[in-house]
Image (cartoon, helix red, strand yellow):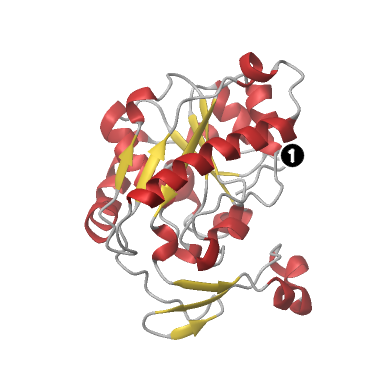
Amino acid sequence: MTIEETGSSPVTQWDPVLTKRFMTLVRPIAKGWFRSEVQGLDSFPAGGALVVSNHSGGLIAVDVPVFAIDFYDTFGYVRPVFTLSHDLLFQGPQTQLLEGTGFIRATRDNAAAALRAGGVVVVFPGGDYDAYRPTAVANTVDFNGRTGYVKTALIAGVPIVPMVSIGGQENQIYLSRGGWLARRLGLKKLIRSDILPITLGFPFGLSMLLPVNLPLPTKIVTKTLEPIDVVEQFGVDADPAVVDAYVRSVMQKALDELASARRFPVLG
């Protein structure tokens, strides 16, 4: 999700034991159904880091568990992976599980607190807009003009780690974000959404969020890139728009390389 300006979150709620159990539960889905792999962790920096990634898979986006499973396998359960998430996820009995496994409300204060504590914070600047990008532009990095993550990295004094993922957007066919329909129905006021995606999948065929189609067993490959020290490269008064353009260009190049190595949709 995108980073908002205000709010607080119990970043100290992260529970390594609960997280390890949760990773054990989702591992068969990531490694079995999606045959996931994560590349580039050998150059991942120590301490706090802001992981900036494209977002894929629509309603059933598995970017976080795909990354977290390999991250914890590599570094152990000593440095938490936090994910900035929409407020709607914390409405119900699942809140304790989410907070215990590293999901925090998407506010700038929460992100900064987690980063200063040495955590790894995953942010998807494009949010749902990115996760529901049409299949025709599945391999395009598009944050919809959002650059707030740059300020967060500067405030917390941590590097940005670009990350790209391919395959998740092949779990069904994404026809349209349905922005026109969302505006007509007033979804911005109801659920803070500018889109009402129209997709085609299995087993229900055409869907507008509901009914929920099952994700195809598409192979997902994720790659973390070299960390970017914003102050070192762009200065203490870095223009977020300039930094964002650079981050997206680095990500787009890496995503293009993953796409060129992919032989077939879904199969990988």
Q: Is residue 237 left or right of residue 74?
A: right
Image coordinates of residue 264 in percent, x first then y, are: 31, 62
Image coordinates of residue 260 in percent, x first then y, are: 38, 50
Image coordinates of residue 106 in percent, x first then y, are: 62, 44
Name the amino acid, label 1: Thr
Tell me how many marks there are.
Answer: 1
Q: Is residue 97 left or right of residue 144?
A: left
- Please tell me which residue lies in front, 80 or 179: 179
Q: Is residue 142 left or right of residue 219?
A: right
Say few, some or many: other residues with alpha carbon within 10 Å of mark 1 (under 14 / 14 to 19 / 20 or more).
few
Mark 1 residue element: loop
Residue 167 visible in the displayed image: yes
Residue 52 visible in the displayed image: no
Which image quadrant for residue 182? bottom right
Residue 60 drawn above or below residue 81: below
Residue 111 drawn above or below residue 135: above
Q: Residue at x 45, y 76 (%)?
A: 212
Q: What residue sits right under mark 1 in the picture?
A: 6
- Please tell me which residue lies in front, 137 or 260: 260
Residue 126 drawn above or below residue 138: above
Looking at the figure, which quarter contains the C terminus? bottom left
Q: Residue at x 40, y 55 (%)?
A: 62
Q: Residue at x 67, y 30 (%)?
A: 243
Q: Residue at x 75, y 79 (%)?
A: 185
- Please tell me which residue lies in front, 168 or 70: 168
Q: Is residue 156 left or right of residue 184?
A: left
Image coordinates of residue 85 in percent, x first then y, are: 57, 49
